[in-house]
């Protein structure tokens, strides 16, 4: 336990803010009886349940669990009038500490707020399944729809429909004034634009998302694990999908992962593939045929037809470990060389982290992940005037280069964070040294490290526009000042 203290001390708020929060919690408790949860209670422990152990070791002065938008309005009015620092939790899947929890502050936990709606015409829907309809949501069943959609949201269906944020018809948003606003292509269009990928914490608390839905049967899905020795062939195939294959068959979706798994004998490469319309289990969809060549032996070939809810459970990653994510984006080059040259850089990181874990007698699992934003996705993102991400069809296609590390001991926090920061810097530098335009620099918010400058990656123009929207809807700067955690403009 002792090793946690430096973390907690570094994050603790100044004494004045702490007492604001104690006062605010009392005021909240009288305004919202039964909805405020104080420490040392079983309910507090259940709200303090986060996917990443780095979050769960912070302790708010209280949690507030609103049931309705009116409850949120009351809470916001108290927090802003008392200048009490707070944050907002939805699914609680942020990796870094303080993403959706706040030491000594107030954490609004939206778990009881039914933020997703089903409309009578069945074209706007709640969640993936009960009605046999699908939405462009995340690929994991427990990840919150809110956080994922506010930052972008990569889905099985992005090839035809863009990211989750491109499929919101209307946001109902609690502004810092305590007033509720709608944001859609018809009203508050600037706010609507900003919320599509610009995150929540600079603008407002979204109390309802109306999502576009569509009919969806089973998907073809194939998870294939190969020896890492095949990385050159596999990354070349992935490059082919990025520049050509995925755009030619937008019903396809895929990502590629490398890791060193001692229990599997060292480096392995994983290709996860999905197809929204293919239903033949004997032959894979043509777009993925290269990966299914008999000359490429697999350690695992898990190929099946499955509905979205089953697939989402399969993709789940258990919580409770320490986690971090970092990412950047590189443009597609004519050859796969850039993507191949990242592999030895990743090997250096793995060696460094394994050495640190061995010295500490703890465990660490690093992953290198490639996720394509092919030209069809960039096109689909243009719906409703485009989103806030700053990704333009003329810059594409591009590949997100993502690093994810899961580890067990706080003693490794520093070496992990430093190692990832350096590696992302090297990837950007490598891209910049290649053919003009190879460096893209977009940083996907939902995979970003705590200290990454996410909004700079959206481009100067979008960053400036987002700032204008934030100061219009949060004119007194209350959310800017009091809403802690995640990324600020
Ligand atoms: C196992 C796993 C699988 C994942 N799969 C995918 C995937 O398939 N595709 C993908 O794109 N990403 C994926 N992610 C990343 C995911 O998008 C982010 O972790 C996202 O932040 C999770 O949202 P959340 O609501 O669970 O998190 P939280 O930590 O609760 O929230 C994230 C941020 O959003 C803010 N926020 C949340 N709700 C609201 C709201 N209603 N109004 C205003 N602000 C709000 C919070 O304050 C916080 O700053 C995955 C993550 C995990 C751990
Ligand atoms: C990647 O493939 C090359 C050969 O093509 C091999 O030398 C290298 O060891 C592989 N890297 C990993 C991490 O497996
Ligand atoms: C993997 O399994 C699927 C479904 O059974 C099959 O279509 C594919 O050819 C298999 N590939 C290999 C190389 O085993
Ligand atoms: C999804 O598939 C699983 C497993 O076959 C099944 O139990 C479940 O009922 C299906 N869900 C829907 C909504 O079809
Ligand atoms: C290392 O960790 C393992 C598993 O936690 C434990 O069983 C073992 O005793 C530890 N060894 C040392 C030298 O601390």
Image: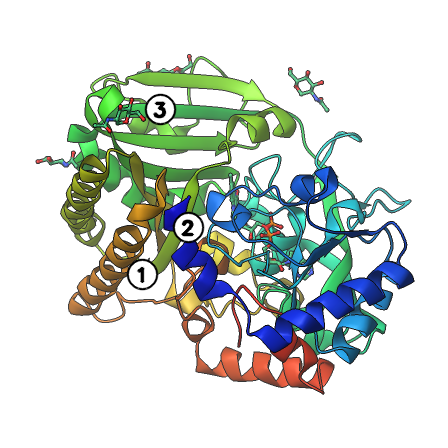
Residue 213 shown left or right of residue 197 in the figure: right
Mark 3 crowdedness (10 Å alpha carbons): few <14, some 14-19, many ≥20? many
> Could you tell me if the residues under marks 3 and 1 are in contact, i.e. CB atoms within 8 Å?
no
Disc 3: residue Cβ within 8 A of ligand 3's nearest atom: yes
> Regarding mark 2 in the picture, which secondary structure is present there?
helix
Q: Label for residue 226?
A: none
Q: Which of the 4 image quadrants contains residue 129? A: top right
Answer with mark 1 or mark 2, whichever residue precedes in sequence.
2
Image position, residue 483 (x, y; %): 63, 70
Q: Which residue is mark 1?
A: 331
Residue 368 shown left or right of residue 454 in the figure: left
Front residue of 184 and 455: 455
Answer with mark 3 or mark 2, whichever residue precedes in sequence.
2
Q: What residue sits 81% from the left and 72% below the top?
A: 78
Q: Which residue is mark 2?
A: 4
Q: Which residue is mark 3?
A: 224
Residue 115 shown left or right of residue 439 in the figure: right
Q: What residue sits 33% from the left and 30% below the top?
A: 270
| In this rendering, the label closer to the viewer, 3 or 1 | 3
Picture layout, residue 192 above or below residue 339: below
């Amino acid at each position: 336990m002792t090793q946690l203290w430096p973390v907690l001390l570094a994050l603790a708020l100044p004494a004045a803010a702490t007492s604001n929060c104690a006062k605010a919690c009392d005021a909240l408790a009288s305004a919202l009886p039964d909805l405020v949860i104080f420490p040392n209670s079983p309910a507090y422990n259940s709200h303090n349940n986060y996917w990443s152990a780095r979050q769960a070791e912070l302790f708010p002065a209280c949690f507030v669990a609103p049931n309705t938008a009116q409850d949120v309005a009351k809470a916001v009015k108290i927090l802003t009038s008392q200048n009490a620092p707070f944050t907002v939790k939805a699914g609680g899947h942020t990796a870094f500490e303080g993403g959706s929890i706040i030491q000594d502050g107030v954490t609004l936990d939206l778990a009881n707020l039914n933020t997703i709606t089903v409309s009578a015409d069945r074209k706007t829907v709640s969640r993936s399944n009960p009605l046999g309809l699908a939405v462009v949501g995340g690929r994991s069943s427990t990840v919150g729809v809110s956080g994922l959609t506010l930052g972008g949201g990569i889905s099985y269906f992005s090839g035809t429909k863009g990211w989750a944020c491109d499929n919101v018809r209307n946001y109902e948003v609690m502004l810092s004034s305590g007033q509720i606003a709608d944001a859609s292509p018809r009203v508050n269009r600037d706010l609507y634009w900003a919320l599509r990928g610009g995150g929540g914490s600079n603008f407002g608390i979204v109390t309802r998302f109306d999502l576009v839905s569509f009919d969806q049967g089973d998907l073809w899905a194939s998870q294939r694990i190969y020896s890492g020795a095949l990385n050159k062939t596999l990354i070349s195939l992935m490059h082919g999908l990025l520049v050509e294959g995925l755009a030619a068959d937008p019903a396809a979706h895929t990502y590629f992962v490398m890791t060193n798994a001692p229990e599997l004998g060292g480096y392995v490469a994983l290709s996860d593939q999905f197809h929204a319309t293919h239903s033949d289990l004997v032959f894979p969809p043509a777009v993925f045929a290269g990966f299914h060549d008999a000359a490429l032996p697999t350690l695992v070939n898990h190929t099946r037809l499955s509905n979205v809810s089953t697939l989402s459970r399969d993709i789940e990653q258990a919580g409770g470990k320490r986690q971090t994510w970092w990412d950047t984006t590189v443009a597609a080059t004519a050859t796969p060389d850039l993507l191949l040259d990242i592999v030895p850089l990743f090997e250096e990181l793995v060696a460094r982290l394994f050495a640190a874990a061995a010295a500490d007698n703890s465990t660490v699992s690093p992953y290198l992940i490639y996720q394509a934003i092919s030209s069809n996705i960039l096109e689909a993102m243009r719906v409703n005037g485009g989103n806030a991400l700053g990704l333009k069809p003329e810059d594409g296609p591009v590949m997100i280069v993502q690093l994810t590390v899961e580890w067990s001991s706080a003693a490794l926090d520093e070496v992990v964070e430093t190692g990832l920061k350096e590696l992302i810097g090297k990837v950007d530098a490598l891209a910049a040294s290649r053919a003009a335009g190879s460096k893209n620099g977009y940083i996907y918010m939902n995979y970003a490290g705590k200290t990454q400058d996410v909004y700079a990656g959206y481009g100067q123009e979008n960053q400036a526009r987002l700032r204008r929207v934030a100061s219009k809807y949060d004119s007194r700067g209350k959310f800017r000042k009091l809403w802690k955690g995640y990324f600020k403009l």
